[in-house]
Image (cartoon, rainbow, N blue to C red):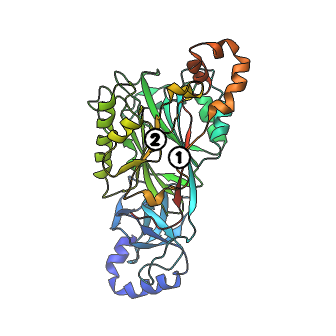
Amino acid sequence: MFLSWLAASRGMMSVLLVFFTTLALGQTATTMRSANIRQHPDGNSGILTKAEKNVAMKLLNTKDTADYYKVATKEGIVGFVYRSLVRIQTDNPSWFVPLVPVSNEPKQLNVCSFNIKFLGSSKSKDNARLTQLMMPYDLVIVQELVAPPYDGAYLDGVRYEGDEESAPFFDLMRSGGFSYYLSNENTGKTVNRVSSTSAEWFVVFYRPTVLRVDSSRCAFVSMPLVANPVFDRVPFRFQFATTDGSLDFSIINVHLASDEDAIAQRKEELHTLATYAETSWTEEKDFLIVGDFNIQDNEEYASALPLQWKSLNDECVTTNVAASRNAANKKPFDHVVYHTTNTTRDLDVAFDMKVVDIFALFYPEWAQLNPTKAASSSWVSSFGSVYSDHHPVAFRLVYGVMDDD
């Protein structure tokens, strides 16, 4: 009805511009890339028009539309746009005055990456303490989830059952204010669609007050998910935007080849991921490759990364728990890799990457309660089944100012 009226009333466009002038003091939404304006807040609804990058629209409603904003274009078309495709402005629309950054004061997005050691394979996890450790963060990126927490379905509709050993961690994270996004399958070297340490799910926990997920761009970076020619475990891409619209970015959650001598394979995995990111730059330039890289030492790190890619852990600080009692076991397993041209400005490089020492936090009490296990040569495995064999690592993103893509 509205479009029919618009088509029959092109002579009234000057009246529409007066309408926009009266609303110019309100907020506007500006596209960060081309975006469809839809009839309803539903990705399957009809497309009214398409707005190119850097087009401003009047923001009519931010409530009761789930993942969509209700907007009106300069031409008077009223519809819905996906939240992560726009940034919110507080100045007048772009056709009246130039756009300015959302804020002159950058804010910090606190992020943690954690190989949690086979979450879903044991009831012995100290979920209460582990989740409490995650509470200071806005985004938590987890590796080694080996069983889904709740009943669900794969993309082809096949149902799977939730796991009572991983659910408590999810329950506590959710009660602490986190939402989560889980990969739609699991992936493994020889098998998937099983709840075992032979295959992994990828999951992120995020605070919806700060971040939104663009589910349309969340996906595995390669196929097949079993016996992949490059990856033992195919990494999963998560796409985020801050709720103020000032920053969007992709996280590629990884657990690279784990064999100590798989140096050539890890290098190929990293170069393949860099190529994947670089071919996606038309729609997103800020890619962070995060997780358990299984890099063994400085020498491997120096040869593994593609040109113009760098890790916040370029010093190769130790991130494995085994080194806490034996310095000879030091391994720089965990990294946050970014493109130095595209993403440096979005990272708090002064903060760098910090290791959260779970050995110092939890080992003394654990050893006192489990003296036999602590004295055993397999103490890392025993401690890891309760906490992990990796330390979590923390870093910061910067948002609140205009993004660069």
Q: Position of residue 273 (x, y in %)?
A: 32, 43
Q: Residues within 10 Å of mark 1 (few under 14, many from 20)?
A: many
Q: Which tag, 2 or 1, sits closer to the chain's start?
A: 2
Q: Nearer the viewer, residue 253 or 365?
A: 365
The amino acid beneath tag 1 is Met
* SS category of the residue bearing label 1: loop
The residue labelled by disc 1 is 353
Residue drawn at (50%, 80%), measured in percent from left and top?
A: 92
Structural distance between the alpha carbons of marks 2 and 1: 8 Å
Residue drawn at (43%, 57%), measured in percent from left and top?
A: 344
Q: Is residue 80 above or below residue 166?
A: below
The amino acid beneath tag 2 is His
Q: Position of residue 136 (x, y in %)?
A: 64, 46
The quarter holding residue 105 reads bottom right
Q: Nearer the viewer, residue 344 or 149?
A: 344
The quarter holding residue 73 reads bottom left
Residue drawn at (39%, 48%), measured in percent from left and top?
A: 310
| Quarter of the figure with the C terminus | bottom left
Is the Cβ of the residue at disc 2 closer than 8 Å to that at disc 1? yes
Q: Is residue 57 above or below residue 25?
A: above
Q: Could you say which disc has been placed on residue 335 in the image?
A: 2
Residue 83 seen in the figure: no
